[in-house]
Image (cartoon, grey):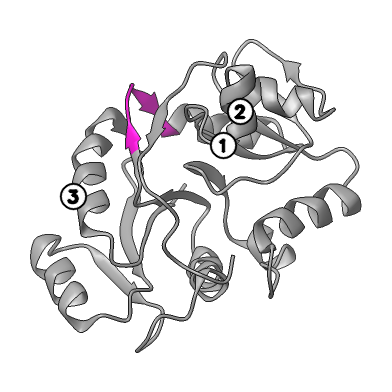
Amino acid sequence: MSTLVAVLTNGRKDCLTQMMPTLANVTFPHDSTFAIFDDSGDPEYRAWLQKTYSGTLFRFVGDEARGYNAAMRLIWQVAEGFDHVFMVEDDFLFKKPVNLQEMADGLRHFPEVAQFVLLRQPWFGNEVAVGGLLPALEAMGNPLWRGSAWIEHRATWSTNPTLFRGGDWVKEHPWPIGEGSEYRFGQELFSSEPRTVCAYWGDGTEYVEHIGERKGFGY
């Protein structure tokens, strides 16, 4: 089972250099391919990436920054050639061990689960106010179904660190064009597939720390 490890960046060297060493907490399947997707449009940053992370596959979104939607659609295009995709934005630190093969096994055995997400700390005001991301989802009226290995919901698709299917699945679920694409992707998924759920891996423990303010555009 082939796995694409897609690292999305757009010029935040300070974030990327903090994040990359923490990938040591992630156990990757032996057939993983690492790829950095850069939407900075900055030749100096791209030269630095190629020098610093030589041996990694690079995909540059364009000669100038084209925005989040274009970057996501490029990831989707490359993902067609892989069984699974582990997507990481450059501003997340991995704080505790996680095994991607166990997550991939979960996707294989439970086809109704569209993605596994690694939970982050409360970040937005409503999350801080109630003590976490999951309590915030519940406060907004989204039920959570807690199992022994993960927590299911139908609230939203998340591009926080996540494992999902590639291949035919991404072909059948194209990334939307236009504003609010992350939210719209989830709503279109749930609307067209009434049994599909997304899930947070684990028992509600935070696996990652979000460290960066949003810099890109076209979300």
**Three-letter amino acid code of the residue under disc 3:** Thr
Residue indicated by mark 2: 127
Q: Which residue is drawn at the image coordinates 47% and 81% (left, top)?
A: 66
Q: Which residue is drawn at the image coordinates 48% and 30% (left, top)?
A: 120
SS under mark 2: helix
**Three-letter amino acid code of the residue under disc 2:** Glu
Residue indicated by mark 3: 17
Sooner in the amino-acid sequence: mark 3 or mark 2: 3
Reply above or below: 183 against 111. below
The numbered dot on residue 124 is 1
Q: In which quarter of the image is the C terminus?
A: bottom right
SS under mark 1: loop
Reply above or below: 70 against 23. below
Which residue is the extreme one toward the bottom? 63
Q: Answer whether labels 1 and 2 touch (C-beta < 8 Å).
A: yes
Q: Where is residue 19 in the image (x, y as percent from the top left)?
A: 26, 43
Residue 77 at least partly seen: yes
